[in-house]
């Protein structure tokens, strides 16, 4: 008998639980208010922003190339090193050019001796011609030889200067201050020089990392709210706690197509105040376009849209009622309610059950 009584009590308890659950999940309107998630209208300060994602790039970045071809004999820097303008970066083999310099120098000296000889011969014939001891042809030939000797000396001098300049170009120097962001060669490798018919080898890249810019694309609706010089904030996915100020430096004058959307590229310049911010990292820019202080606002999900109307569902003692509202600015979470909702009002974040059936007031 005792065992039957225990089984009976268990059945009664289970029945009571099932009854309570059925009431909780039933469509009874009397309990509908308990099933609708809510938000409370509060005063907040809101800031509307235009946001976009993009890539961080250096404002000044140079591909370093050589003007002469040759074999690399020494590399004096490595990736990540800081360099200053004119600093030696690497050295090419100088053997062949040094030999050409010596040869050109000897050729120049030979032309100088020929010039001295031509000058002596001209002066001698000039005196003899004045005394009518030589004919005019011999005198004029001596004068021509002198002029040719002068020209040959100038040519030899130019050739020497050319090979000396090529020799100086075997030492590759930094074009400006910066950091070596990429090194593409190794010692012993052969590079080609940049000429009118060849682009030459990209030896390395030097970039100034103090000033950077972010390149992003803004859709055609938002771009009308932007202007050159407008302030912005930059955030970085890899550094969630870091935010840096920036300024819009460029807005493209023509749109580009990104899929089915027309976008305008923009550039936001900023100072890299944190060494973790490097060229190539992804970033998000937020550009404030409006701000409202201490205004009544609610979660975005509390506002519903129907045609051109905006409305909310307000809960009071008698239940739920639908209320049209006028909206102000919004951020990513909240929206300003200009008219239609009092402070501390309870609003539904989903349609109350009685309005899901289309029973609108």
Image (tube, grey):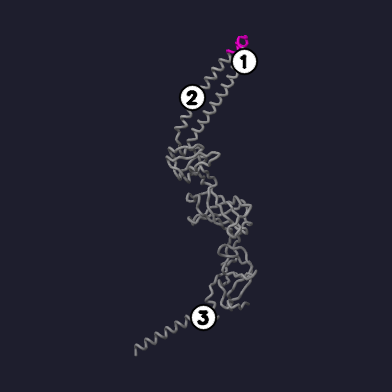
- How many callouts does the rendering have? 3
Query: Residue 50's x, y, as percent?
Result: 59, 58
Quadrant location of the C terminus? bottom right
Among the two numbered marks 2 and 1 on one chain, the one whose residue lies closer to the N terminus: 2
Quadrant location of the N terminus? bottom left
Start and end of the magenta stretch? 124-134
Among the two numbered marks 2 and 3 on one chain, the one whose residue lies closer to the N terminus: 3
Q: Determine which of the numbered discs, if any, sits on residue 26 in the image.
A: 3
Query: Residue 221's x, y, as percent?
Result: 62, 59
* Residue at x-position 60% and y-position 19%: 144
Do the residues under discs 1 and 3 have CB atoms within 8 angstroms? no
In the rendered image, which residue does mark 1 sit on? 137
Rendered position, 123 above or below 155: above
Query: Residue 116's x, y, as percent?
Result: 54, 18
| Mark whose residue sits in front, 1 or 3 | 1
In the rendered image, which residue does mark 2 sit on? 106
* Residue at x-position 52% and y-position 46%: 210
Helix, strand or loop for disc 2: helix
Q: 10 Å neighbourhood of mark 2: few (<14), some, or many (≥20)?
A: some
């Amino acid at each position: 008998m005792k065992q039957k009584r225990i089984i009976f009590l268990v059945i009664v308890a289970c029945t009571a639980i099932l009854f309570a659950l059925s009431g909780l999940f039933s469509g009874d309107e009397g309990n509908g208010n308990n099933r609708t998630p809510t938000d409370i209208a509060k005063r907040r300060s809101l800031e509307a922003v235009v946001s976009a994602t993009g890539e961080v790039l250096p404002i000044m970045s140079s591909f370093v190339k050589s003007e002469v071809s040759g074999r690399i004999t020494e590399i004096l820097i490595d990736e990540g090193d800081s360099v200053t303008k004119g600093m030696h970066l690497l050295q090419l083999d100088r053997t062949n050019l040094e030999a050409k310099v010596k040869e050109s120098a000897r050729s120049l000296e030979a032309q100088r001796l020929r010039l001295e000889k031509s000058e002596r011969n001209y002066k001698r014939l000039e005196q003899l011609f004045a005394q009518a001891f030589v004919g005019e042809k011999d005198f004029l030939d001596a004068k021509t030889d002198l002029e040719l000797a002068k020209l040959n000396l100038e040519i030899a001098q130019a050739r020497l200067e050319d090979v000396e300049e090529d020799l100086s170009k075997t030492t590759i120097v930094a074009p400006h201050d910066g950091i070596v962001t990429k090194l593409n060669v190794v010692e012993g490798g052969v590079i080609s020089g940049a000429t009118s018919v060849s682009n030459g080898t990209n030896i390395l890249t030097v970039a100034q990392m103090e000033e950077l810019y972010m390149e992003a694309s803004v859709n055609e609706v938002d771009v009308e709210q932007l202007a050159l010089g407008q302030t912005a904030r930059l955030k970085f996915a890899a550094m969630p706690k870091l935010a840096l100020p920036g300024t819009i430096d460029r807005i493209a004058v023509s749109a580009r197509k990104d899929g089915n959307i027309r976008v305008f590229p923009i550039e936001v310049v900023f100072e890299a105040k944190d060494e973790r911010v490097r060229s190539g990292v992804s970033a998000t820019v937020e550009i404030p376009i409006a701000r409202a202080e201490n205004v009544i606002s609610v979660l975005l999900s509390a506002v519903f849209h129907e045609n051109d109307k905006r409305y909310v569902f307000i809960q009071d003692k008698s239940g739920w009622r639908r209320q049209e509202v006028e909206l102000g600015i919004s951020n990513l979470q909240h929206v300003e309610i200009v008219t239609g909702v009092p402070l501390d009002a309870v609003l539904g974040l989903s349609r109350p059950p009685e309005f899901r059936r289309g029973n609108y007031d």
